[in-house]
Image (spheres, rainbow, N blue to C red):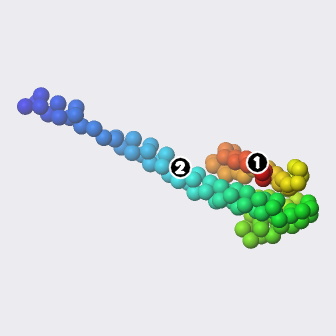
Amino acid sequence: MHAQRTVSRARQRGLSFIGVIFIGLIAVATFAIGGQSVPIFLEYQSIRKAAQKAATEGATVGDVRAIFDRAGAIDDISSIQGKDLEVTKKGDKVVVSFKYSREIALAGPAYLVYRFEDSTK
């Protein structure tokens, strides 16, 4: 009878309490960082859209920056402004390039830094 009880315990599977705590901490950290990262990526998409609009509608550097600033006011873009854009011409097309970074404070002196760099085609 004693041998059967030992065999059945050996077949049991599952997580220990420490394992559950560890997986819970990882899940909380993932959701916390992910929750702060999603708005950053949504803003990046808005910046790309505004830069593309400025490149297609603007003819001069001032026009491109003004169009970007108006689109940025509508889409609530706060990471970059029209003055931060690099506006060039390739042939007959206006090319708008931008580069910026955003930080998320993790704990103490630790930060998660996103660096974005893109240009219109």
Q: Position of residue 71 (x, y in %)?
A: 77, 68
- Indicate whether 11 appears above or below 81: above
* Residue under the image location 89 percent in, 62 percent down: 59
Question: How many discs mark residues in the rendered view?
Answer: 2
Foreground of the two, 102 or 86: 86
* Residue under the image location 81 percent in, 70 percent down: 70
Q: Is residue 79 left or right of residue 35?
A: right
Pointer 1 residue: 117
Amino acid under disc 1? Glu
Amino acid under disc 2? Thr
Tag 2: Cα neighbours inside 10 Å, few (<14), some, or many (≥20)? few
Q: Position of residue 11 (x, y in %)?
A: 22, 34
Helix, strand or loop status at disc 1: strand
Structural distance between the alpha carbons of marks 2 and 1 = 25 Å
Q: Which mark is residue 91?
A: none
* Residue under the image location 12 percent in, 28 percent down: 3
- Indicate whether 78 appears above or below 90: below
Give the label, 2 or 1, closer to the camera.
Answer: 1
Q: Is residue 74 left or right of residue 38?
A: right
* Residue under the image location 17 percent in, 30 percent down: 7
Q: Position of residue 28 (x, y in %)?
A: 50, 51
Residue 76 visible within the image: yes
Helix, strand or loop status at disc 2: helix
Q: Position of residue 24 (x, y in %)?
A: 44, 48
Q: Quadrant of the N terminus?
A: top left
Q: Is residue 58 left or right of residue 106?
A: right
Pointer 2 residue: 30
Foreground of the two, 32 or 74: 74
Q: Which quarter of the figure has residue 13?
A: top left
Foreground of the two, 89 or 21: 89
Q: Is residue 35 left or right of residue 112?
A: left
Dot placed on the residue nearer the N-terminal end, 2 or 1 = 2
